[in-house]
Amino acid sequence: MSKNIHYPENNIKNRNNQPVIVRIAPSPTGTLHIGTARTALFNFLFAKHNEGRFYLRIEDTDIERSKPEFEKDIIENLRWLGLKWSGRILRQSQRRKVYAKYIKKLLDSGRAFWCYHTKEELEEEKQGQAGRGEAQVHFCEHKHDSRRGQTSANSPRSVLGAAKGVIRLKCPANNIKFHDLIRGEIEFQTSQIGDFVIAKDAQNPLYNLAVVIDDYETKVSHVIRGDDHISNTPKQIIILESLALARPQYAHIPLTLAPDKTKLSKRHGATAIQEYKEIGYLPEALINFMSFLGWNPGGEKEIFTLEELVGEFTIEQMQRSAAIFNIEKLDWFNGCHIRQLSLRELTKRCIPYLENAKLIQKEKNEKCKKFKILSTNESISLSWLEKVVRLEQERMKKLSEIGELTGFFFRDELTYELELLRWKDMTKQELKSSIDKLYNILSNVNSRDFVTDKLSAILMPEAEKMKDRGRLLWPLRVSITGLKASPGPFEVLSVLGKERALKRIKDAQMRL
Ligand code: GLU
């Protein structure tokens, strides 16, 4: 959908003398959420601004909750937004062997160990800590027990006949500090972390371990993600240190909140990009809107293309406070981007909505060029559709409005209340004579002259003669559109053409 722009990947080295590589790592446990799309956008902008790479990694280790249809939705909608990733998609479910290697390494080095505490024991410990007002963390005594906490990759449960174990990492005593590119210096006390679980068994890492391994193996230089992940960062740093691996740089983006300052959720409206697409928001508008959720280039300019955003974006301009989602602002961006599209492009994007509204259908065997009006079976061309769409390009806020705004062009019969034809205090006789007059005048206009300026030059003097122009122009508007509010009557006439226009005026005559 979006322009296919080639962004160079020249691997410019950053401060740490590393090329810029970032990633978006969604879990396919739901459709592409606007929050994830926004994080993807900031990663994309950062990568492309620095001529680096942006990878897509599917974090599908949660087998029960991960679904192929969600993965498909994520991929399709990232593409639709124009957030093209570099290289192949990495799927965590295909990387068990890689993870096993690292788990073994951690066990062999004694940094990780098997823990056999049962759920009940852990729960009891938690309750006790809660009761004493202490942090609910587990410092596991099994790490000191060579029989239990043995460091082989194979679970020694059979030896002990104990419950199925998990693999934990030994928590260091020193606090974990890191510099966040958005939030500055951050420090976590390890006493609040404990010996945390890193894997369910020798092949199946949990989120934190898999992230660290994948980021390391794909040479991710900057981890840019939502700040709901900030408490995972010290754990990831502990894992990195246990494996003697260098850290990436971190940037935690403040979340987007609903207008009532609560977490953005379904009850505030659409959250899935797919829904926004269906409502008729342009990818260009969503990109522009999302970029301003937490970032600001300074200055007056608000309308940006993706390419322009790539040029402008710097992480230093990211806000530290939460962004507030404002749907009116999105509508405004959408209107602006609709007006920036060429008429042909806008028309093409409106076609699916006209089809959905059962107004038109593509002609069979025609490649997108010929259509028919469903109510009349009349053949119409793309250029006629363009004329229709042009009348609404200025007003339209969402593509899905096109059916309602232009439906009258496609209906065989208009179903307005007869009373609507009457202008102010006109008598029925006067109304009839206005309609007759319109019919007579327009029958004598050459069909080639059914263009806005010429029609205006012919009809305006007639309307002026009537003292109150509305006496001619109002019945004209209603008889050809069936609506109180519509584009100007001369424009509508010019799009309808002589034959259709006269039929509509005749219908009004008959009904009167
Ligand atoms: N799978 C995680 C998520 O969807 C990725 C977090 C990260 O970027 O490290 O939130």
Image (cartoon, grey):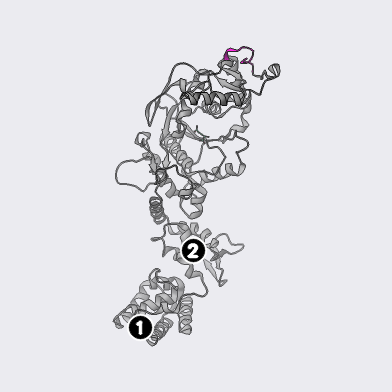
- Would residue 185 be found to the left or right of residue 382 on screen? left
Quadrant of the image containing the C terminus: bottom left
- The disc labelled 2 sits on which kind of residue? Gly
Residue 91: x %, y % from top left: 59, 34
Q: Farthest residue to the bottom: give it.
A: 429
Residue drawn at (61%, 62%) of the image? 365
Task: Report the residue marked by disc 2.
Answer: 403
The residue beneath circle 1 is: 426
| Residue 449: percent from left, percent from top | 41, 76
- Label 1 sits on what residue type? Met
Drawn side of residue 147 relative to residue 49, left or right: right
Element under label 2?
Answer: helix
Q: Is residue 145 magenta?
A: yes
Q: Is residue 271 magenta?
A: no
Q: Position of residue 5 (x, y in %)?
A: 46, 43
Kindly indicate the quadrant of the structure image that contains residue 8. Answer: top left
Classify 10 Å Cα crowding around label 1: few (below 14), some (14-19), many (20 and above): few
Badge 2 local density, few (<14 within 10 Å), some, or many (20+)?
Answer: many
Residue segment shown in magenta? 143-152
